[in-house]
Amino acid sequence: MSYLEMMNFKRIYHRFEIIQTPQNVKCFVCGMSCNGKNVLKCNDCNRHCHEFCQDNVVSNCYNKNIQDDYQHSFEPSYLGGNCVVCGKSGGAICRCVWCSLLVHNACQPKLLNCCRQLMIKSSERTHYFINEGKGVCVVCKKEICQEDGNSFHCIYCKESIHEKCCCDNLERRCDCGKLGAYLIHPCEVIFKNRYLLKIPLEQPMFFIINELSGGKRSKEVISLLGSYFHPMQFINIEELTIKASTISQNNDWYSKEKKPIIVICGGDGSVESCLDQFGPFVTYLLLPYGTGNDLSLSLGYSPSTTLAEFEANPIDLLMRRIKDNRIQIDRWKVTKATYPGDSTFFDFRHFTNYLSIGIDAAIAQSFSEKREIGPCGRFINKCKYAMSVTALLDDSCKNIHNKIIVEVDGEEIDLPPMDCLIFQTTLTCYGGQTLWKNPVGFKEQRMDDGMLEIMYIRNIAELGSVSIGVSTPTPLAQGKDIIITLKPNFVLPLQTDGEPFLLENSVLHFYCESHNTFVSSHY
């Protein structure tokens, strides 16, 4: 089978053949004029395209409807550029987040170009060109300028090329540049009722996005990175349960030295959702879009600095983070039994940062309800969190020393008067505060030693001073096996990693279940 026949076979029913270039004809894939000698025309629908654009043809012949998977997703663009339809700049112009194609709002009805397809029948990675190349032509090594006519650049490897250099001299295979090890190319995807990876990849990267975090600011991740990565590499956290099994199917990830990278775009609660799905078999990298972001701070990354650098130059930040150190962090499993009378424990939940009981959990419960009603930015969320102290008007969350029994490594602990009890494994809590400052008589705090630091806060006034770093909680104990009994007739607020819940008549048992790999600036 010839190259052209092979390409025709894998297209969607177009019957292309090479023709002499007619005048004033544009490629219906890239929108540029067809001035080269290798131009294809479909014998059925009479559409024209460059031979090097044929691999990107996704529309059906006879002008049938384009499949939904290949529709553009436009958003306003403020970076400028020429419209692919009229070739002019200026005016209200939009950019496709998936293929970077530019088009005026008024020109969209005339747009014939399809978005890049999610899969192709190819044995190797190929280029995907869009209009307007920049820099130096990869073929002739000359600077690309407007006087040279049309030019293109590949969205994967970012190499640019003159239109006049495309036909005979361009290697079809694309190395996908510095992101090659982390992205999924359409040739590596198959469709079996849903999109699946058909071959094991070196170290794919997936972005888990929690749209509620940061007042929906995390949605910007797709705008910033959509043109670099495959759409299946972006997963809304609400679809995580379904998509997690999809992206791991037919792949031997867990036997590889280089673990896949899960980029979590959210807060501490989002981290727990990802750990539930992927476990210790991947590497986790955080983009801290949450309100508190304690885990990110424990890993040595400031949320404000990280997000500012990411939104200014996302690829550079990702490449730097990937080269950072890998550390292990304990993950704690919580099991629950009914008290009294039931000795059977069932899986209940997990936590990586902390578990707390009392007034801080009551505030978190009130804040969570407010955030569900109207998500806002991190600053407004923190204001809402502060206003949630009205939850403390209810005395049910106070004097918890009279309402619980705590056993640490088999020994019951005498509880002094307190309104809050904290079990912590990471280095920071309450939005970056260091609670355990290695007090005398206790072991040094580590995140990978399978041990929890246990401390308490006496009242709401002390909680306020702790949350702003003026004081620290009182150390109580350290332990590896914890049992908490909630006495009957009391409903207590608890939280794990910022996710609050209410509990009564229960016995909780928690212990270190696994160690998970995180990217960190710490050694």
Image: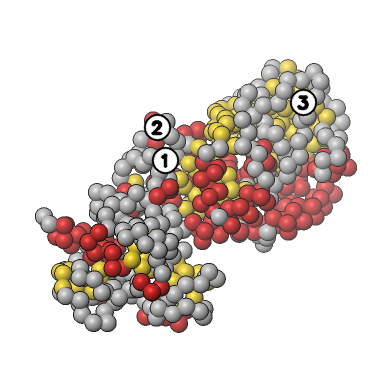
Quadrant in the rendering for residue 495: top right
Give the crowd class for mark 2: few <14, some 14-19, many >=20 residues within 10 Å: some
Q: Nearer the viewer, residue 142 or 248?
A: 142
Question: Between disc 3 and disc 1, whose residue precedes?
Answer: 1
- Using the image, tell me which numbered label, if any, was put on residue 256: 2
Residue at image point 51% right, 80% down: 91
The answer to whether any part of residue 208 appears in the image is no
Q: Image point 47% across, 72% down: which residue?
A: 81
Residue 386 visible, this angle? yes
Q: Residue at x 40, y 73 (%)?
A: 146
- Which secondary structure lies at badge 3? loop
Determine whether 233 is above or below 424 in the image: below
Q: Amino acid at mark 3?
A: Asn
Distance, label 1 to label 2, CA atoms, is 9 Å
Q: Are marks 1 and 2 in contact (CB under 8 Å)?
A: yes
Q: Secondary structure at mark 1?
A: loop
Q: Amino acid at mark 1?
A: Gln
**Label 1: how many residues lie within 10 Å, few (<14), some (14-19) or many (20+)?**
many
What separation in Å lies between label 2 and label 3 (alpha carbons)? 37 Å
Quick one: 447 or 106, which is closer to the camera?
106
Q: Where is 182 relative to 383, above or below? A: above
Q: Which label sits on residue 203?
A: 1
Asked if residue 301 lies left or right of residue 10, the reply is right
User: Seen in the image, is 60 located left or right of residue 273?
Assistant: left
Instruction: Write down the residue under mark 3.
Output: 438
User: The disc labelled 2 sits on which kind of residue?
Assistant: Lys
Placement of the N terminus among the 4 image quadrants: bottom left
- Mark closest to the chain's N terminus, 1 or 2: 1
Counting every numbered tag in the picture gives: 3
Residue 161 vertical position relative to residue 282 in the rendered view, above or below = below
Image quadrant assignment for residue 515: top right
